[in-house]
Image (cartoon, grey):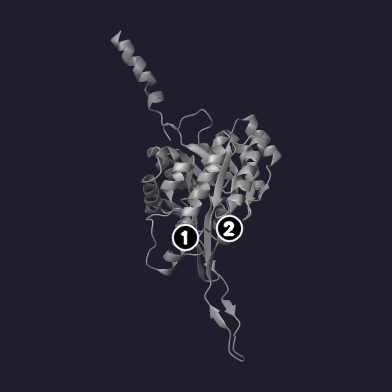
Amino acid sequence: MKRLLFLLLFALAPAAFAATPPVALFYMTSNPNSIRDFFAHSSQIDLLVPTWYSVDQNGLVTGEPEPAVLSRAQEEKIPVMPIVALFNKKAFHQLATSTEAQARMNEALVRECKLHGYTGFQFDLENVDYLDRDNLSALVKATADALHAAGLQLSIATVPNAPGYPGADGFAKWIYTDWRGAYDLAALAKSADLICLMTYDQNTRWTTPGPVAGWQWTLDNMNYALQFVPKEKLSLGIPLYGYHWYTGAPIVTPATIPDAAPTEKPNPTADYISYPDAMQLAHDWDGKLQWDAEDHSAFFWFYRDQEREWVFFTDLHTFQDRYQLAQQNGLEGFCSWVLGEEDPAIWNFLPRHGQTSAGR
């Protein structure tokens, strides 16, 4: 009898210890590639967040769903939580300081949820002045209260803001005052149902070449967020795209003094790039594909016009490491920007609905 019990427990052990997969949240744009991607992989998407709506300073909400996408999501019982976006300091301040505008916005959000069967909305409020920090927290609370009263949910995408204050140089000050400093994670977590930590865009066209989401930077921002946000409410951002850095033509500014020569400034810059386009670029220019073990990131470089160009991007390995980071820390899930840009191999890694991620 004891032997039989032992064998039974041994047989059940894999199921008992199988890791629960993180909730797979994917963003989707109206780009045809993004929509096709949703239809191809909907069975591996747990929460769809499409970029269907925006709001202005007066609280006017504009947007509508993609009918075919909404129909598929409803057929497969995939919750849909569209983004409502605003990326403007002045407009946000006006919205956040007007109870009338917020009431107009919240009424529209509830209406759209009831009309289309959304589970709620996600705020994507960026380029917010750090002095509007308390206004942002108050706006999120008011909207959360309105949605909760209607049986709906509110999530918010937040710019990573560890260590919670600016650094020493000019860029560090700017990125804090204009992008990172407005998010009071403790206050937001009390109101919102989910915090989507946008742990990507560490390095962009505004910076020198580097990973889209370096490993230590990701760890630092995750651990900082966990000081304020319960892990059950935290979704870790995983980028699906990359950046391509190159030397642009000098920026020429006409002279303001008659007969004076125009001034010229250097123009190193970068463009957003998808995984398929990155691979095509590497193929066309004999890119040297490499793995950065320090930052857990894929990259390559090549020469064109006697100048070295750099590409950092997300491949399967890069994605897996961050997925496992979310899983090992017991986070609610991960949030990935954006469908249509990814390494197709991630779909061989991600479980389908009802599967565990044991052994991954």
Which residue bears the numbered disc 2?
Answer: 94
Label 2 Cα crowd, 10 Å radius (few <14 / some 14-19 / many 20+): some
- Please, is residue 252 above or below residue 330 in the view? below
Q: Disc number at residue 347?
A: none
Label 1 Cα crowd, 10 Å radius (few <14 / some 14-19 / many 20+): few
> Horizontal placement of 108 versus 221: left or right?
right
Q: Name the N-terminal-most of marks 2 and 1.
A: 2
Viewer-side residue, 134 vs 269? 134
Residue type at mark 2: give it: Gln
Disc 2 and disc 1 in contact, CB within 8 angstroms:
no
Residue type at mark 1: give it: Leu
Which residue bears the numbered disc 1?
Answer: 131
User: Horizontal and vertical percent for residue 49?
Assistant: 58, 42
User: For the residues marked 2 and 1, what is the alpha-carbon distance in whole angstroms?
Assistant: 13 Å
Q: Quadrant of the N terminus?
A: top left
- Please, is residue 218 above or below residue 11 in the view? below
Report if residue 346 is visible in the image. Answer: yes
- Label 1, secondary structure: give it: helix
User: Horizontal and vertical percent for residue 7?
Assistant: 34, 15
Q: From this viewpoint, which residue is outermost toward the right?
A: 67
Report if residue 289 is visible in the image. Answer: no
Residue visible at 57% across and 45% down in the picture? 27
Q: Quadrant of residue 230?
A: top left
Q: Quadrant of the C terminus?
A: top left
Viewer-side residue, 169 vs 85? 85
Q: From this viewpoint, which residue is outermost toward the left?
A: 2
- Label 2, secondary structure: give it: helix
Residue visible at 38% across and 45% down in the picture? 226
User: Horizontal and vertical percent for residue 195?
Assistant: 47, 44
- Please, is residue 265 above or below residue 102 in the view? below
> Horizontal placement of 129 versus 58: left or right?
left
